[in-house]
Image (spheres, grey):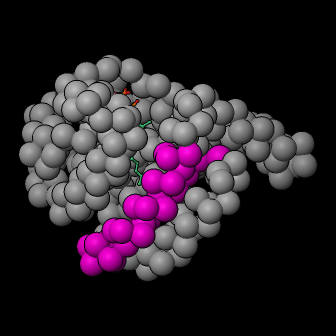
C-alpha cells in the first residue's frame, strides 16, 4: 500500500520525541512517557510493516542522551530488554526483522546481550526491518567512517581516490540496507523541527514531516496521513 504510486517509500526514519511532555501533561513521571513510547513502537512497527515499508529506523537513544539523570538513563537502557521480552512473539508473528545500530559496545552488557539475541532470533524474517538507533550520533558515525576509510588507505587496501559517495554510504551504519540505506521520509513528533544529530548524511534528499503530536499519541492514522502527504510531494533530487 505504501508503494501504490510511482514514488517509492521504502525507508522511514522517526525521531520519537515528546515522551516526557506526554507524561508531564498527565502528572506522571517522565519514565511513564518512555514506557508508553515503547508500547507505541510496537504499534507503529506493525502498521509500517503492513503498509509495505521495508526499513523503519527509530531514534531510541542518542549519544547525547547519556547526559540525562542517571535514573532516566537506566530506564531507557532497560527499555529494549522490556520491549523484546514483551513483544518478541508479535515481531515473529509479523515477520519483522530486528537490527540495532549505534556505538553498541558502550551499552550496558544486558542491553547489548538482549538486542543481539533479538537480532539472532529474527534474522530469517523477511518483513520490515525494525532498525533501532541506540547510542547513535551522526557526526560521530561520519567521523568513525572517515577513520575506517583512512585506515584502509594507510594499509594500502584502497586508494584515497577510490573514496566516493557510494563507498562512504556503504561504510556508514546504514550501509547494510543497500538500496534502502537512505530514508525516503523523516518524521519527528512533538512539534520540534530539528535533526538532532540523526542520520545527517543519509537525510540529504529525504522528505521531512513534522507533527505536534507527542510520540506516545502518534498512531497508525497519523502515519498514513504523513505517507499521503509524502506521496503528494514532488521529489526531484535537485533536478527539475
Ligand atoms: C524523546 O522524548 C525520547 C527519547 C529520548 C527516548 C525514546 C524512546 C522510546 C520512545 C522508546 C524506545 C523503545 C525501545 C524499544 C528502545 P523526550 O524524553 O525528550 O521527551 P520531551 O522532549 O517531551 O521531554
Residue situated in front as seen by the camera: 89 or 231 = 89
Q: Which residue is rendered at x = 48% and y = 33% of the image? A: 198
Residue situated in front as seen by the camera: 59 or 226 = 59
Q: Is residue 208 visible?
A: no
Q: Is residue 97 magenta?
A: yes
Indicate the quadrant where residue 183 lies: top left
**Could you say where residue 234 lies in the image, as x and y percent from the top left?**
17, 30
Q: Residue furthest front?
A: 27
* 95 on left or right of 196: left
Residue situated in front as seen by the camera: 181 or 105 = 105
Compared with 47, 125 (above or below) is below
Look at the image and tell me in which quarter the C terminus lies: top left
Compared with 119, 131 (above or below) is above
* 93 on left or right of 139: left
Q: Which residue is rendered at x = 16% and y = 37% of the image? A: 226
Q: Which residue is rendered at x = 38% and y = 76% of the image? A: 125
**Could you say where residue 238 lies in the image, as x and y percent from the top left?**
34, 24
Quarter of image, ligand 1: top left
**Could you say where residue 144 lies in the image, as x and y percent from the top left?**
71, 39
Look at the image and tell me in which quarter the N terminus lies: bottom left
Q: Is residue 38 visible?
A: yes
User: What secondary structure is the stretch in magenta mostly built from?
Assistant: helix
Compared with 239, 127 (above or below) is below
Magenta part of the chain: 74-103
Indicate the quadrant where residue 151 lies: top right
Amino acid at each position: 500500500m505504501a508503494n501504490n504510486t510511482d514514488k517509492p517509500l521504502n525507508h522511514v526514519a522517526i525521531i520519537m520525541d515528546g515522551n516526557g511532555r506526554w507524561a508531564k501533561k498527565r502528572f506522571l513521571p517522565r519514565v511513564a512517557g518512555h514506557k508508553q513510547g515503547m508500547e507505541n513502537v510496537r504499534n507503529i512497527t506493525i502498521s509500517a510493516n503492513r503498509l509495505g515499508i521495508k526499513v523503519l529506523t527509530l531514534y531510541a537513544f542518542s549519544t547525547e542522551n547519556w547526559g540525562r539523570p542517571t535514573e532516566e538513563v537506566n530506564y531507557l537502557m532497560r527499555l529494549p530488554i522490556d520491549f523484546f521480552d514483551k513483544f518478541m512473539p508479535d515481531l515473529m508473528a509479523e515477520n519483522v526483522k530486528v537490527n540495532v545500530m549505534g556505538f553498541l559496545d558502550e551499552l550496558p552488557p544486558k542491553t547489548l546481550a538482549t538486542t543481539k539475541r533479538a537480532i539472532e532470533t529474527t534474522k530469517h524474517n523477511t518483513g520490515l526491518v525494525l532498525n533501532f538507533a541506540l547510542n547513535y550520533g551522526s557526526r560521530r558515525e561520519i567521523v568513525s567512517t572517515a577513520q575506517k576509510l583512512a585506515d584502509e588507505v594507510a594499509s594500502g587496501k584502497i586508494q584515497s581516490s577510490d573514496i566516493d559517495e557510494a563507498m562512504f554510504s556503504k561504510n556508514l551504519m546504514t550501509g547494510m540496507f543497500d538500496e534502502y540505506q537512505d530514508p525516503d521520509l523523516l518524521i519527528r513528533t512533538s512539534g520540534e523541527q530539528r535533526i538532532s544529530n540523526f542520520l545527517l548524511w543519509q537525510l540529504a534528499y529525504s522528505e521531512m514531516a513534522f507533527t505536534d503530536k507527542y510520540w506516545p499519541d502518534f498512531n497508525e492514522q497519523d502515519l498514513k496521513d504523513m505517507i499521503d502527504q509524502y506521496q503528494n510531494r514532488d521529489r526531484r533530487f535537485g533536478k527539475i
